[in-house]
Amino acid sequence: MRLSWGCSSVGLECLSVEEEVAGSSPVSPALASDCDIIQSMEKDESSVLTEGLQEGFAGGEGIESSKRGGFSIKVSHIVDAKGNVYHDEWSADRAGGGQELIEVDGKQFTRVYAGGTIPLEKLQELGTTKKEVMKYLKKQITENGSKTRLYSDFNPEPEGDWKYSYKIIDTEEEIPLTTGKESVYFKENLVFVHDLVISPVD
C-alpha cells in the first residue's frame, strides 16, 4: 500500500502525513512533484531492502562465498515469509562495492554501492581499525533501519568519538534515480564512505 508523503524539505526528508514532527503541527501532504523524486519505492519494498541488509550484511546471516566471472564475492540471499526476495553480492575488503536486488509482488529494485575506509595505516594513526569502523557502521544499519540508505538525509547524534551521516546528493525524477552518500567519522576525521544509487528495474 502506498503512503501519502509530506516533505519537511524538498529532497531531504519525506514523512507520512499521519506522522507529526515534534513541537509542530501535523505535516501537510506535499505536491506529487515534491516527493515522487525521492520516494519511488512503496513501504513494503523499502522494508524488504532494509530488513535484508540488516539480516545479511549487518547481521551476518546466510552469507556465503562465491564466484562471479572469476571474481571472488560474498553473497546474501534472503526470501521472507511472504516470498519477497532480497539478494546482495559484494566484493570488498578495505574498499570495493556491490549490488542489492529485491523483488516484491513482481516489482524489482536495485541499490548499487561502492566505497570503503581510508588506508589502514591512517586508521591506525587515528587510533582505530577497519574492524571498529565496520562494527559502528553495522550498528547504525541495525539500529536505524529505513532511516538511512534510502530517500532521506539522516544525521544522528554522535556516539563518543563516532559520527554517522547519510545525505542525498542527487535525484533524477524521470528514471527515477536517487544517489546518496554514507559517511562515518572518527574523532571528526572521515574514515569511511559509501556512495549508493537506487533505481527501479523495469
Image: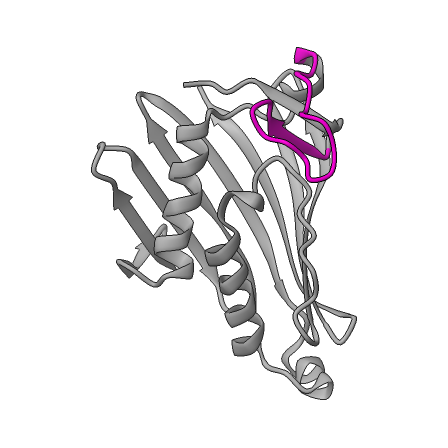
Q: Position of residue 178 (x, y in %)?
A: 63, 32
Between residue 111 and residue 11, name the one nearer to us. 11
Q: Quadrant of residue 177?
A: top right
Tell me if 185 is positioned left or right of 114 in this view.
Answer: right
Q: Quadrant of the C terminus?
A: top left
Q: Is residue 127 visible?
A: yes
Residue in the image at 44% along x and 44% along y: 50
- Report the magenta residues as a range: 12-32
Tell me if 10 is positioned left or right of 124 in this view.
Answer: right
Q: Is residue 70 visible?
A: no
Q: Is residue 107 above or below residue 143?
A: above
Q: Position of residue 21 (x, y in %)?
A: 68, 35
Q: Tell me how many marks there are.
A: 0
Between residue 33 and residue 193, name the one nearer to us. 33
Between residue 107 and residue 186, name the one nearer to us. 186
Q: Is residue 35 above or below residue 57?
A: above
Q: Main secondary structure of the magenta part?
A: loop
Residue in the image at 64% along x and 30% along y: 14
Q: Is residue 130 above or below residue 14?
A: below
Q: Position of residue 163 (x, y in %)?
A: 69, 65
Residue in the image at 39% along x and 26% along y: 108
Q: Quadrant of residue 37?
A: top right
Q: Quadrant of the N terminus?
A: top left
Q: Position of residue 107 (x, y in %)?
A: 37, 22
Between residue 165 and residue 71, name the one nearer to us. 165
Asked if the magenta segment contains residue 30, the reply would be: yes
Q: How are the residues colored?
A: one colour
Residue in the image at 49% along x and 57% along y: 143
Q: Is residue 183 above or below residue 128?
A: above
Q: Quadrant of residue 116?
A: bottom right
